Image: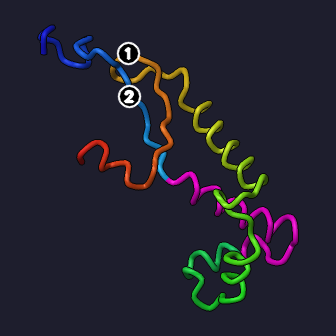
Amino acid sequence: MEKGLDVTRGGAKYNSSGSACIGLADITDSLMAIKKLVYDEKRVSLSEFKKAIDANFKGYPQLYAMIMNRVPRFGLGSDEALETAQRVAKFAHDAYYGHMNYRAADTLPDSGPCRNHVIFAT
């Protein structure tokens, strides 16, 4: 306000903007389910896993139970899940970093909670 400039013209004291990457835990848990049940243990094929997802697991109670009970989840002490989350976060960082945003600053990913919109009053 003091400068009389829009944020895109240098009016902001802090020029922080980027992408709000919501759902890191969900992405991690999903990747862990595919990794463990399709690739590591070979309990189900990838095409069958996709069919179950498309059906929202209706008709696939055993697969759903395996996902809920046998797959390591983010935030529950699994080093493997934590490593997967770190790989996802690094992927997001690498994909965004170095691109200029509309404010002529580096675009950075922010990994916030699912209620991130509350912070921004939207």
Question: What is the quadrant of residue 42 in the picture?
Answer: bottom right
Query: Tag 2, which secondary structure?
Result: loop
90 displayed left or right of 21: right
Q: Amino acid at mark 1?
A: Ala
Give 97 or 73, whichever is nearer the viewer. Answer: 73
Using the image, tell me which numbered label, if any, was put on residue 40. Answer: none
Q: Which residue appears at 38% of the width and 54% of the height?
A: 115
- Most frequent secondary structure within the magenta stretch: helix
100 magenta-colored: no
Decide: is 112 above or below 114. Answer: above
Decide: is 89 above or below 1. Answer: below
**Residue picked out by circle 2:** 17
Which residue extends farthest front? Answer: 77
**Disc 2 from disc 1: Cα separation:** 10 Å
86 displayed left or right of 3: right
Horizontal and vertical percent position of residue 64: 66, 81
100 displayed left or right of 37: left
First-in-chain label (2 vs 1): 2
41 magenta-colored: yes
Q: Which residue appears at 58% of the width and 56% of the height?
A: 25
Horizontal and vertical percent position of residue 32: 72, 61
Q: Are marks 2 and 1 in contact (CB under 8 Å)?
A: no
Question: What is the quadrant of residue 98 in the picture?
Answer: top right
Q: Amino acid at mark 2?
A: Ser
Magenta-tinted stretch: 23-48
Query: Tag 1, which secondary structure?
Result: loop
**Count of numbered marks:** 2
Horizontal and vertical percent position of residue 14: 33, 18
**Residue picked out by circle 1:** 104
Give 85 or 98, whichever is nearer the viewer. Answer: 85
